[in-house]
Image (cartoon, rainbow, N blue to C red):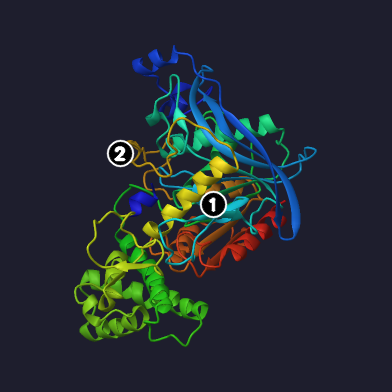
Amino acid sequence: MRRLLLAAALICAAPPSVAQDMTLVTSPEGAARSQAPVPAPQRFVTRHRTTIRGKTIDYVATAGETHLFNAAGDPVASLFAFSYVKDGPRDPDRPVMFVFNGGPGSSSLWLHMGAVGPRRVVLDQEVNPANVPPFGVADNPDSLLDVADLVFIDPVGTGYSRAIGAGRPEDFWGVDQDADSVAQFIELWLSENGRWTSPKFLMGESYGSVRAALLPRALMGGPTYVGVMRGITVNGVVLLGTTLGGRGGPPDPDRAVSSAASDLTAQAATAWAHGRTAHQASALPVFQAEVEAFARGAYSDALRAERSGALSPGARAAVVRTLTGYTGLPASAYAESLAVPSATFARTLLADKGLALGLYDGRYTLPLEPTGNEPVADDPAMTRYVPGFVAAFHQMLHDDLKVEMKRPYGAIVWKDLLASWKWDRAQVAPGQSFAQDLAIAMRRNPDLRVLVASGHYDLVTTPAAARRQIEEAGLPSDRVTFKDYPSGHMLYLGDTAAAFSDDVRALIAAAK
């Protein structure tokens, strides 16, 4: 589950000894392909009008391809993006926000249709909706288009984006390679649209939070990271469904303790949403503060003591009593370990009703059995809202944006991509947190501000884990804002979109 969420090097002139790990290598097959003519980028331009927060906005929508290039100037990728720019005289001081989702392997349609874009999906209800048509598309009253131009980016291998010419898909499938390719796209977009002096913002969800944390470094550039000096700084970064923990590195016995403590807070919030805790009289924020204090203190201490065999039976029984009061699980759930995986929690909490909970959003339910054990199609949240989002997006492509492409749009693409994804990084120690990249960027840029947005009922990328990862990296606390919403991984579902929009607007206003 976590690997699905944590789901090319376009290096330019840097000495091979410095940038060797990120240099694009063209295979004989790629060299042969590069001899074939590369079609010109396709673009689809339409004009629209909408009303946001009582303000009428005329805008130009451009859906289309941008070619990326290797050091020799050969096209190696065609990256598809959706740009929404306020109509009228060009305003170089108007903010622009670059938006993407995660995976690795996900297109940007989720933020596009759920929270930020000028059009949004309409479901019959936002929590536990029907997942069969009809689905609707409507103007988004909470879109950010009134305060910033918007660019939705689909990385190579997702949406309509693909490798072309001498490029190979796997050249772009890696942590550094992905960040570098998106950075080159942003660089080209700024030049094409004359927006180098505009305030710039990044928004990434799930693995997109990793991309958003790395991009400030890739956009600035340097001889040891990406190998070019782009010299682009950003004013603000928005992280949703944040997952910035490092990959690899030496074993860390305390990582399991931290993970279990973070999981407990989301499990308790989800149990509260279903009326299963012993603390239903407490408001959710008050309850969450109590659980998080316990998780960081007595619970973490008990987990360490249990691991070392130093936890007495009496002390263990006291911890179990607290846990059952918080999570609504029976004491038997903690018979073997004080740490209950969220997947187990999701199948246990409402088992008496024959229901399983969604990991991506604990408010959603489906019958416990039969299940195909597909981590997305059988997740009670994802299987309910994915069909509506995908259908609404395709309808918008056809009716509003007039997009006519001859290949399928990859909403989320795991085939080949995940198996080829390179987690090893250039000039970065194995296991280093991705939050450290953001800390480096904030040191370089004293004006960079960060909004970390999380859903209480997200059992995969929990608010507590996001806080811990940010704190451990030492990001300046006066420039980081944490916001939690009574929602899940897609935290803008369930009457929370307006509040999220307000918080992003505040970031834009403060960071201009």
Residue at disc 2, secondary structure: helix
Residue 384: x, y in percent? 40, 60
Of labels 1 and 2, the one closer to you: 1
| Picture residue at 66% right of the left edge, 37% below the top | 46
| Picture residue at 44% right of the left edge, 13% below the top | 36
Per the rendering, the mark at residue 419 is: 2
- Disc 1 or 2, which lies upstream in sequence? 1
The kind of residue on which mark 2 rests is Ala
Residue 59 left/right relative to 10: right
Per the rendering, the mark at residue 67 is: none
Residue at disc 1, secondary structure: helix
Residue 495 left/right relative to 262: right
Residue 402: x, y in percent? 58, 37
Residue 335: x, y in percent? 20, 77
Q: In this view of the protein, can residue 439 be seen by the observer?
A: no
| Picture residue at 44% right of the left edge, 85% below the top | 280
Query: Which quadrant holds residue 365?
Result: bottom left
Residue under label 1, please give it.
113
Q: How many numbered badges does the structure rendering display? A: 2
- Nearest the eye: 400 or 251: 400
Residue 45 left/right relative to 269: right
In this rendering, is residue 288 above or below 53? below
